[in-house]
Amino acid sequence: MKVLATRVLLDPTGERSLPIRERLPRPATLSGQVVGLLDIHKPRGDIFLDQLEQLLTDAGAQVRRYQKPTFAKPAPVDLRHEIATQCTLVIEALAD
Amino acid sequence: MVAPLLADLGATVYTQDDPTFPEGVAAIHDVDLAVSWHSDVETVPTLIRVVAGLETERTVGWVRDEWRRITGDANLGADLPAFRPGCGSLSVDPDRVDALRARFSGHLLKSRRIELADPDDEMEMLFDRGFTDGLPVVPPTEARVLRMLEGTNRAADDLVGVVPPDLVELTVEKVAVNAVLAGCKPEYLPWVLAAVEAVCTDAFNIHGVLATTMPVGPVVVCNGPGTRAIGMNSGVNTMGQGNRANLTIGRAVQLVIRNVGGGRPGEVDRATHGNPGKLSFCFAEREDDSPFTSLAVSRGCSPTDNAVTVFAGEGPRCIVDQKVRTAPELATVLAACLRTLHNPKLVYGFDTMLVIGPEHARVCADAQWDRERLIAELHERLQLPGAELVYGAGGIADGVPEQFRDSTLPKFRPDGILLVHAGGNAGLFSAMIGGWVNGEMGSQPVTRVVVP
């Protein structure tokens, strides 16, 4: 039987092992939920979110509004923490 | 020549290639060259004095006085000439050194090992695992990565930065692995390290540069005497194909973002069109005959520094004027073309890198216009009437809000024109490279000195 020779290469990646996170179950009702609306600071994102806020409020949700300082960078850690601790749901809006 | 002396020295004698040499001496055969490697022997013979297990002295080749001093034998080699230089040690033989380094230093590399069995085509495997940018890469073996690391004085585990978008801590070793993939020579590695460090700053914001739908990527401009030393091209076809240093330095930067940072097209990279420069966009400034101070010097470096400047830019676009003979004419045509950058009605939000070709630069030199003068003349010509820029004006929807109708607005912010001198001798051409969202809200150009 031929013995397979091995060659060895080095992994060029960041070698991350990703934690698998389960999605939260879909809420049965919007009533009583605190929904965060994150405006990423693109033009006219506010128009889209105003409409959403109205719909969500009509459905009995409490809405909190947030905004990234710039769409060109990820949301700051503090902002993400604020949303995570204050809201039960979040909607991130992209618009132009 | 020294062989007859060795029997009476009382020394432990190692022989590299021939176990029967030297005759009459019970030499130890350093068959795998381990002793030679770990003792840093570069020349044979090398005489080392060891006291209590530690080296105290050494001499290389045959230097009679040194041998006498180290052995304590005042009459040693009386019949021999005073000096002979010796020969190269097998442990530094170019045909063997990579394998020896891998064998004896491979354990210093921390990257995960990927084993390939005989039937595996390593080139195909590298494609299949997503390690390439769409072109073949050089397989990163231990020997190649260790040889790459010889290009820098920095330790393999030294931290270079944190790479977006996955925010992974980046070591010199990981940069070296990707530099091998890209096809770099070891002497390019310090340039790759400096460029990667510049790209991974908050100011440059590679996350945003990657994620944007615009067709931008890092444009790397290299300055300093080292660009000539590593053979970079700043002349004919400087932004095109054909020069290994230009192409592979830029490519290595992109491969680090892809492989270590996890920034891949269609994932975080959302570019609508992209541009071919996202494979690699790197060139050197033509400094020797430039009428301008260099880009790096204008950004605070000294003329003797080696430096890289990274700019979030799209592909280059040619500015043609073959009739131009005066500096004011040149400024006017450059300004007219620069006005169209991204959209003739979009102002202030985007920078440009303006690459002046040598024949256009000569027009400036004739008029004794330096960098500052040319940039000032461009800004002067790029003060635009708001009435031409407001939404809808000229039948073009985009532009600026109506409130600016009576204002005069500059096309570029004050430091928004990055001037570079590069290109071949012939051709009254320049090139403009459009930037991405500038300033704190987007990406700032970043300059870093290259350290060995």
Image (cartoon, coloured by chain):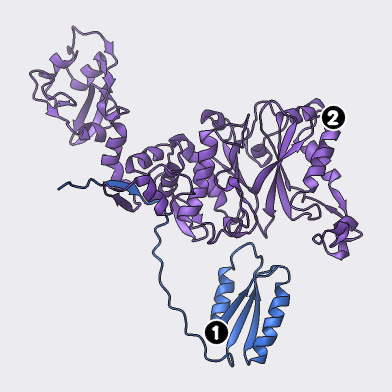
Quarter-of-image position of residue B296: top right
Q: CA distance from mark 2 to mark 1?
A: 66 Å
Secondary structure of the residue carrying tag 1 is: loop
**Chain of the residue under the numbered disc 1 shown in the image:** A
Task: Report the chain shown in blue.
Answer: A
Residue B46 in the figure: left or right of residue B272: left
Give the vertical position of B73 relative to A84 (above or below).
Answer: above
- Numbered tag placed on residue B326 in the rendering: 2
Quarter-of-image position of residue B394: bottom right
Determine crowd level at label 1: few under 14, some 14-19, many 20+ residues with C-alpha closer than 10 A.
some
Residue A70 in the figure: left or right of residue B175: right
Find the residue positioned furthest to the right.
Answer: B406
Point out the image quarter for the N terminus of chain B.
Answer: top left
Q: Provide residue B312's location: percent of width, then percent of height.
A: 63, 50
Secondary structure of the residue carrying tag 2 is: loop
Task: Report the chain shown in purple.
Answer: B
Q: Are marks 2 and 1 on the same chain?
A: no
Residue type at the position of mark 2? Thr
Give the vertical position of A78 relative to B87 (above or below).
Answer: below
**Residue hosting label 1:** A88
- Tell which of B387 and B303 is nearer to you: B387
Q: Are marks 2 and 1 in contact (CB under 8 Å)?
A: no
- Tell which of B157 and B355 is nearer to you: B355
